[in-house]
Amino acid sequence: MQEIIVAIIVLAACGFTLKRYLPRAFRLAMAQRLAAQCTRWGWHRLARRLAMVSKVDAGACSSCDACKKAPSKQTGFALSALKDTLRRR
């Protein structure tokens, strides 16, 4: 039983890591191929869901999502913070 739980946790961590760090184009290609395979197997609901995800993600330019985030108000750094980091080393 413990092996099954560990396998589920490892697969979930792997899926999260792949979703987070793979380039968007690669993720879209994977989603499209999985949707096609799910259609062949008769899993139409999952195929529609994967196709919908790939259509939503197709509108963005890259995987960084920088354009969606609000710009930072702080553009510089404090000189005291730089001195503190130099003292630590």
Image (tube, rainbow, N blue to C red):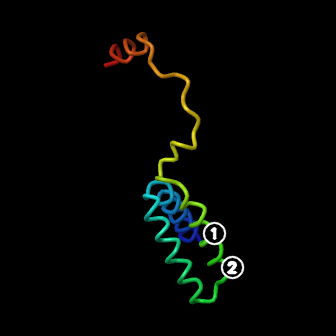
Say whether marks 1 and 2 touch (CB < 8 Å).
Answer: no
Q: Camera-side residue: 9 or 18?
A: 18
* Residue at the extreme right of the image, as rendered: 45
Give the amino acid type for the residue marked by disc 2 in the picture.
Arg
Badge 1 amino acid:
Met
Determine the residue positioned at 37% across, 18% down: 85
Q: Which residue is mark 1?
A: 52
- Residue 7: x and y in percent read 52, 68
Q: Residue at x 52, y 47 (%)?
A: 65
Quadrant location of the C terminus? Answer: top left
The numbered disc on residue 88 is: none
Q: Residue at x 60, y 61 (%)?
A: 56
Q: Is residue 16 above or below residue 48?
A: above
Q: Secondary structure at mark 2?
A: helix
Q: Nearer the viewer, residue 45 or 54?
A: 54
Q: CA distance from mark 1 to mark 2?
A: 11 Å
For marks 1 and 2 on the same chain, the one whose residue lies earlier in the sequence = 2
**Mark 2 neighbour class, 10 Å CA radius: few under 14, some 14 to 19, many 20 or more:** few
Where 43 falls versus 77 (above or below)?
Answer: below
- Of the numbered discs in the image, which one, if any, rests on residue 45? 2
Quadrant position of the N terminus in the picture: bottom right
Q: Nearer the viewer, mark 1 or mark 2?
A: 1
In this rendering, the count of numbered labels is 2
**Residue 81 appears at what percent x and percent y?**
43, 15
The x, y position of residue 42, in whole percent, is: 63, 89
Q: Nearer the viewer, residue 44 or 62?
A: 62
Residue 12 in the figure: left or right of residue 83: right
Q: Residues within 10 Å of mark 1 (few under 14, many from 20)?
A: some
Query: Please, what secondary structure does the residue beneath circle 1 have?
Result: helix
Q: Position of residue 38 (x, y in %)?
A: 58, 83
